[in-house]
């Protein structure tokens, strides 16, 4: 009898085909007849949940890892950017150090480790993440400290999605809805369409209780939230949009829809019930924007970004499960 | 102010781009590093959940609708075949009549209606589905009565997935795992690979409590279950494999793995936790087969069919939710 197979101790990259990670995977464009019918318009979902590490963040992380000269990349992230950076670094022969709060969900810690990342914990009761990053920066002088959104390399990495959509979307598609957190994805999309020479109306969707970007657009300057807002869309829990993102968003965003929390769960549920898509809360934020401001999209063909699908089972079941409608 | 958009009363086809339904969508090939790591082998998921109507059944339904001369197609189905046939008929200008048990889940009834199908209920306490179909056949003499698996047109429709995989899978992939219910998908896959002139080892995965196909292979003739087995994989609740499927399975299947019920939930959970895939129980049956017989796949590169993703919220949450591990 043969030996029962054992999972190897090496990072996941050893179980990937050669060439993986040379470029991001193309986004998955999908149109769901039942969702169209429910909304009364045509919606093309641009699904990044099948991207490596399960979210668009891999685009930025790979571009970073391919373009910085430092052998180590250091970042604070309890979410998708950490996984993406860990995987991108393994694929490019670099080392990643991810700062995560000590109370992070076990599944998120496991994911970063499985992608080959080194985790450094921070106790948020005694130290800020920034302090911990600075401490580690002193300890690893050869490290590049990466922001998940406020970095030209991150914007350039995310712009690949914009260029791809500019090429693949039919001419009838004239509206694009995207989640807005720190602004890394939205600014990348705007840049990508600009580079491709294609015009499209880009509309941001931001949680109402984390509406710093919407307020910034109105004020004409970056406005900050007082604290990290506790929206269920954890990818949008940013205090403010980034300085590198701001001028691109200011000039390139058509508007921002402010989304009530309940709409986010509703969007996740609609994706579950009417489409094949498993989305995380931030991933469903674009669709939640469509639900929140239907007049904006009436009669249009809309491309809606589903930015990621990594979600804890308990959060998913609570938002999508029976009795939540 | 503009009017809030209303979902139109017409079937979903009116909200699809021109040309939809001329051919099935290509399957979604996806490799998940974390799933590979968990299993210790390379698994290429061939995901049919993004197929029109959410399962591979659309391949058969479209081929049927395109090739039968009758203007009406009549079928008994409480699951994916009903939705698929309803949609395929709308797209080809035919009419579909779907016989469903009176106690069918509301979401399944809604789905068939939304795809434009006419539903005829049967009260399973007083009448068999076959009797109801025969009653309707007498009432609609112009109807073609379709089986979801035991029909050469169904096998030919499903063979498109085999031909596609034969072309797209790399030469290192020498094993293919597929759910087995009535045998429509497995026989279609075998036929497709044969037509493409490519050899691959095809392994069926069948629920242990619905193991008529495994017993048939051993007996060398079609063996029936006494009653419709109540496996959670509702797509495999068939009394026996079909007569048209049998000779193809007999000659083309390498073996059948008999899957304990608990493995099906485990496979759905792994897909949820480690991949972006939302699978229904029958859709996860192939992966459950991998989990059940790891020795068979040790050291191999395996293509695993995820045949569909249409699942009620309560079933999904019960199998995938917290506390089920």
Image (cartoon, coloured by chain):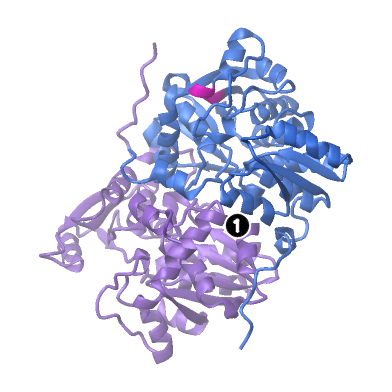
Chain colours: A blue, B purple
Could you tell me if residue B306 is visible in this image? yes
Residue at point 49% right, 46% down? Answer: A277
Q: Is residue B264 left or right of residue B137?
A: right
* Image position, residue B202 (x, y; %): 55, 76
- Work out whether B222 lies above or below A30: below
Task: Check the image and report above or below for B195 versus B105.
Answer: below
Residue B287 x/y as whole percent: 51, 67
| Residue located farthest toward the bottom when viewing the structure as drawn | B219
Residue A22 falls left or right of residue A228: right
Whether residue B242 is visible, yes or no, is no
The total number of labels drawn is 1
| Magenta region includes residue A4 | no
| Relative vertical location of residue A1 with respect to residue B252 in this rendering, above or below | below
Q: Which residues are magenta?
A: A204-210
Secondary element under disc 1, as helix, strand or loop, is strand
Q: Quadrant of the N terminus of chain A?
A: bottom right
Q: Position of residue A217 (x, y in %)?
A: 61, 13
Q: Nearer the viewer, residue B102 or B319?
A: B319
Report which quarter residue B227 is drawn in: bottom left
Q: Residue at 53% across / 78% down in the picture?
A: B293
User: Residue A252 sits in which quadrant?
Assistant: top right
Quarter of the figure with the C terminus of chain A:
top left
Residue A59, image x and y in percent? Answer: 71, 40
Identify the residue at image location x=34%, y=40%: A324
Residue B196 occupies which quadrant of the picture? Answer: bottom right
Q: Residues within 10 Å of mark 1 (few under 14, many from 20)?
A: some
**Which residue is pictured at 48% across the width and 32% down the height?**
A287
Closest to the observer: B286 or B136?
B286
Q: Which residue is mark 1?
A: B29
| Front residue (pair A320, B113) | A320
Judging from the image, mark 1 belongs to the subunit labelled B
């Amino acid at each position: 009898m043969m030996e029962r197979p054992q999972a190897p101790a090496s990072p996941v990259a050893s179980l990937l085909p050669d060439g993986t990670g040379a470029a991001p995977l193309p986004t998955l464009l999908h149109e769901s007849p039942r969702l169209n019918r429910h909304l009364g318009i045509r919606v093309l979902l641009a699904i990044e949940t099948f991207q490596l590490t399960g979210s668009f963040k891999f685009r930025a992380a790979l571009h970073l890892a391919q373009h910085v000269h430092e052998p180590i990349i250091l970042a604070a992230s309890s979410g998708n950017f950490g996984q993406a950076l860990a995987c991108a670094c393994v694929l490019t022969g670099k080392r990643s150090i991810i700062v995560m709060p000590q109370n992070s969900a076990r599944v998120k810690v496991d994911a970063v480790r499985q992608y080959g990342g080194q985790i450094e914990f921070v106790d948020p009761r005694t130290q800020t993440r920034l302090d911990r990053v600075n401490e580690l920066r002193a300890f690893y002088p050869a490290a590049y400290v990466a922001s998940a959104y406020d970095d030209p390399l991150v914007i350039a990495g995310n712009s690949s999605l914009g260029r791809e959509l500019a090429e693949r979307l039919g001419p009838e598609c004239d509206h694009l809805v995207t989640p807005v957190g720190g602004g890394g994805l939205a600014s990348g999309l705007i840049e990508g369409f600009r580079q491709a020479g294609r015009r499209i109306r880009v509309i941001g969707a931001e949680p109402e209780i984390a509406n710093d970007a919407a307020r910034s657009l109105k004020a004409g300057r970056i406005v900050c939230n007082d604290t990290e807002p506790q929206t269920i869309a954890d990818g949008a829990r940013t205090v403010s949009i980034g300085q590198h993102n701001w001028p691109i968003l200011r000039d390139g965003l058509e508007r921002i829809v402010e989304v009530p929390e309940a709409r986010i769960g509703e969007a996740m549920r609609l994706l579950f019930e009417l489409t094949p898509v498993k989305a995380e809360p931030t991933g469903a934020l674009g669709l939640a924007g469509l639900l929140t401001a239907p007049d904006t999209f009436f009669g249009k063909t809309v491309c809606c970004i589903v930015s990621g699908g990594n979600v804890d089972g308990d959060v998913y079941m609570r938002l999508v499960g029976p009795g939540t409608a």
